[in-house]
């Protein structure tokens, strides 16, 4: 890249690093709340179903509002939605801490506390629904087509690091002083919001993003296979979280408390391996996004089959780490393939619609996993292996559709992504991705 282009790209390199800090903070808050809310709900006098309803309605609200935010992101810009989303994420821990204190002081009843918490959570979840589409669109704006998967991997790795941090914070303070922990989470996210306010630039987009009707159109005819990969991939991912402890109990004879501890260990190993593969994706792997997608599918399918046939807990642990490693390639590769098949003016729109597929997968996975486990402890893993083979077929279909499309005849999705303006002066090249 010429020196002048490097000079122009420098703010975008800093922007990607600043955005990563925001994603780490948001991941920490998200993970902490998922871990702490169920036992905290009991302390506040909520039934387990009430707490589950709170979490489910929050996730549903974020899912349903994501397409709306995707459209607004194209009009308002990436930076504004990122700030709105992070500010909303910072406000909820503050509200929860205040309500916990009021309930503990006997100022509020359990019913009133739940009603207030639900009334606060849903609008804040709706406001946070723009984070994901805005983040994906930002990464699409600042990465070249051959590094798009690396940009999406950076996004996933940052959130994963934050999720691990949130789990560690829950272990350290979540039981003894939850109000202090909630205040600390809110302070961290508020600090990240302030950093984004001061240092995050609005990425410049090609002129086609606002002037070319085709560039602003959602290309459903080209991207539907990648939407299918999102749906089935997230279904498999959420299925695993549902059945891993059950598999340890019924397949290996572990006691309930031991199975819970071991399941947490295996899921953490999977998360660490996933972050590791995403770091490799960011720093080393270049080329068409279908490459990491296919690598991820094949690796995940092989490890899923190993998990189905695992004779010992140790082998099961190896398989879970391998599944995490493969998914670290699979999901960023899929997002990148979807992104480079989309015009510069529809990146956030497509990310928002893809959020619907994520929500459906998160809803379908636990139910499918529990149903399959009734047949045998190995069945969820065997069916997941079959679903991953279906992902390979969808990836090939997406590749073929990209080559046959009128505006991309004879070119792969990554080639067409470059043609839609991915290589502009503000784009990060393969040697300039932040670590």
Image: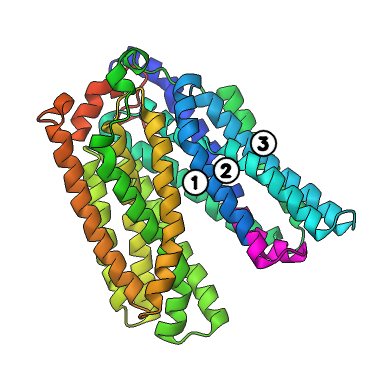
* Residue 320 horizontal/vertical position (percent): 37, 67
Foreground residue, 88 or 422? 88
Residue at which label 1 appears: 159
Residue bearing the label numbered 3: 190
Q: Is residue 322 among the parts visible in the rendering? A: yes
35 part of magenta stretch: yes
Q: Tell me if residue 183 can be seen.
A: no
The answer for how far apart the CA atoms under marks 1 and 2 are is: 7 Å
Q: Residues within 10 Å of mark 2 (few under 14, many from 20)?
A: many
Q: Which residues are magenta?
A: 31-51
Question: Residue tagged by mark 2?
Answer: 26
Question: Residue 209: x, y in percent?
Answer: 35, 18
Using the image as rendered, state which of residue 61 and residue 102 is in the foreground.
61
Q: Would you say 390 lies left or right of 83 here? A: left
Relative to 207, does residue 274 appear above or below in the rendering?
A: below
Q: Residue 216: horizontal and vertical position, in percent?
A: 34, 22
Q: Earlier in the sequence, mark 1 or mark 2?
A: 2
Residue 102: percent from left, percent from top: 85, 52
Q: Tell which of 140 and 370 is nearer to you.
A: 370
117 up-or-down from 289: above or below: below
Name the quadrant of the N terminus. Answer: top left
Q: Is residue 268 magenta?
A: no
């Amino acid at each position: 890249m010429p020196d002048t282009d490097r000079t122009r790209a420098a703010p975008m390199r800093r922007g990607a690093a600043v955005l990563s800090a925001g994603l780490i903070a948001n991941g920490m808050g998200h993970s902490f709340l998922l871990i702490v809310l169920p036992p905290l709900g009991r302390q506040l006098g909520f039934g387990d179903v009430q707490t589950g309803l709170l979490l489910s309605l929050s996730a549903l609200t974020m899912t349903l509002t994501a397409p709306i935010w995707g459209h607004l992101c194209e009009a308002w810009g990436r930076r504004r939605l990122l700030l709105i989303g992070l500010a909303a994420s910072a406000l909820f821990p503050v509200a929860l801490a205040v309500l916990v204190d009021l309930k503990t002081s006997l100022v509020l009843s359990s019913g009133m506390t739940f009603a207030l918490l639900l009334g606060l959570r849903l609008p804040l979840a709706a406001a946070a629904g723009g984070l994901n589409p805005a983040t994906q669109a930002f990464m699409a704006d600042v990465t070249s087509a051959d590094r798009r998967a690396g940009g999406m991997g950076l996004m996933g790795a940052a959130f994963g690091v934050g999720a691990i941090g949130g789990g560690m914070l829950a272990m350290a303070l979540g039981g003894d002083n939850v109000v202090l922990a909630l205040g600390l989470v809110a302070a961290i996210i508020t600090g990240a919001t302030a950093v984004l306010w001061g240092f995050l630039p609005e990425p410049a987009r090609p002129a086609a993003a606002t002037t070319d009707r085709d560039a602003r159109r959602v290309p459903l005819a080209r991207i539907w296979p990648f939407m299918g990969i999102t749906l089935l991939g997230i279904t498999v991912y959420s299925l695993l979280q549902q059945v891993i402890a059950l598999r340890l109990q019924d397949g290996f004879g572990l006691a309930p408390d031991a199975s819970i501890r071991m399941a947490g260990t295996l899921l953490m190993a999977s998360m660490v391996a996933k972050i590791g593969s995403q770091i490799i994706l960011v720093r080393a792997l270049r080329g068409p996004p279908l490459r990491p997608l296919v690598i991820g599918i094949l690796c995940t399918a092989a490890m899923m089959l190993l998990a189905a046939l695992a004779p010992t807990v140790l082998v099961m642990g190896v398989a879970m780490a391998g599944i995490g490693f493969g998914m670290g390639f699979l999901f960023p590769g899929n997002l990148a393939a979807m992104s480079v098949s989309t015009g510069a003016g529809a990146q956030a729109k497509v990310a928002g619609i893809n959020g619907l597929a994520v929500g459906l997968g998160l809803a379908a996975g636990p139910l499918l996993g529990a149903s399959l486990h009734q047949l045998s402890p190995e069945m969820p893993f065997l069916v997941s292996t079959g679903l991953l083979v279906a992902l390979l077929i969808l990836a090939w279909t997406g590749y073929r559709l990209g080559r046959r499309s009128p505006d991309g005849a004879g070119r792969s999705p990554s080639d067409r992504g470059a043609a839609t303006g991915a290589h502009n002066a503000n784009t990060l090249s393969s040697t300039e991705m932040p670590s």
